[in-house]
């Protein structure tokens, strides 16, 4: 028959036998041992309760077992994540600034603002002027030529760009009519009427130019 081992309280402390210092339970483990005793109906924890708590490994010790290589890898990963977040935030800020600058340069009612015309001149060297919004009777020949040329160029082409978007709102191409004092076209027929008006203005400009040349001749 196999020999049964003695109860733990009848055995000597193995640490003392090995010449090592005795270990004491931490405050947290002491509390856990007391709770275990209460659950078992005992007023105080016994040796078995204390042994069970001593054998339990704390989560802190597990965390501290990470090798320096793993710790360095974790730190590197955190640093990389921070850098990625910073780059993303920087890109978002830059994109937001570009959008706000673009919004300042475009008149929401159509055409460019004064800031937009300056930006266009700075980028492309073109000297854009505001659209002509006067009545035909008040225009100079040069203003007739400018407005007539714009109207034919924008709305007289064979294939027109979209005049309304998917939501039924005027596109920037259609809104440019507002900058020239014309009603914003939403149909091809309305756009063609602006182009026809442009043709008439160009015809008036050519007649005025011919009269001027005749007087000088």
Image (cartoon, rainbow, N blue to C red):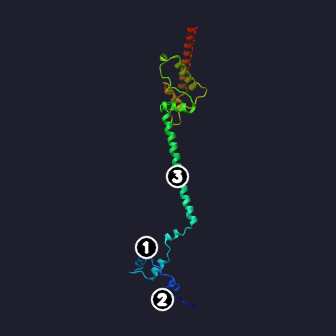
Q: Is residue 88 above or below residue 6?
A: above
Above or below 90: residue 164: above
Q: Earlier in the sequence, mark 1 or mark 2?
A: 2
Q: Residue at x 47, y 17 (%)?
A: 138
Quadrant of the drawing holding the N terminus: bottom right
Relative depth, front residue between 135 and 84: 84
Q: Mark 3 points at which residue?
A: 85
Residue 187 picture location, percent across and down: 53, 28
Which residue is painted at 54% across and 57% down in the image? 79
Extreme residue toward the bottom, this view: 1
Cα separation, mark 1 vs mark 2, equals 27 Å
Q: Residue at x 54, y 32 (%)?
A: 122
Q: Which of marks 1 and 3 is nearer the N terminus?
A: 1
Residue with the mark numbered 1: 28
Q: Where is residue 125 in the image (x, y as percent from the top left)?
A: 57, 30
In the image, residue 105 sits, relative to residue 21, either above or below, namely above
Residue 147 position, x and y percent, is 53, 22
Judging by the rendered image, the residue that carries numbered circle 2 is: 10
At 53% across and 16% down in the image, what residue appears?
141
In this view of the protein, can residue 124 be seen by the observer? yes
Residue 75 image offset from top left, x and y in percent: 54, 60
Q: Of label 3 and label 2, which has the lower sequence position? A: 2
């Amino acid at each position: 028959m196999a020999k049964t081992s003695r109860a733990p309280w009848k055995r000597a402390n193995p640490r003392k036998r090995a010449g090592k210092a005795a270990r004491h339970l931490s405050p947290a483990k002491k509390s856990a041992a007391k709770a275990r005793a209460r659950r078992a109906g005992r007023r105080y924890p016994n040796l078995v309760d204390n042994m069970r708590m001593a054998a339990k490994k704390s989560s802190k010790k597990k965390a501290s077992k990470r090798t320096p290589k793993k710790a360095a890898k974790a730190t590197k990963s955190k640093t990389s994540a921070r850098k990625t977040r910073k780059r993303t935030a920087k890109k978002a800020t830059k994109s937001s600034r570009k959008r706000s600058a673009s919004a300042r340069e475009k008149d929401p009612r159509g055409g460019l603002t004064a800031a937009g015309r300056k930006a266009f001149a700075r980028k492309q060297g073109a000297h854009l002027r505001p659209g002509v919004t006067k009545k035909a009777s008040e225009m100079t020949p040069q203003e007739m030529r400018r407005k007539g040329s714009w109207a034919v160029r924008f709305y007289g082409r064979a294939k027109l760009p979209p005049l309304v978007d998917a939501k039924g709102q005027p596109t920037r191409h259609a809104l440019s009519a507002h900058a020239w004092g014309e009603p914003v076209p939403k149909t091809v027929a309305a756009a063609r009427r602006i182009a026809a008006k442009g043709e008439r203005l160009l015809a008036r400009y050519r007649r005025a130019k011919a009269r001027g040349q005749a007087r000088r001749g």
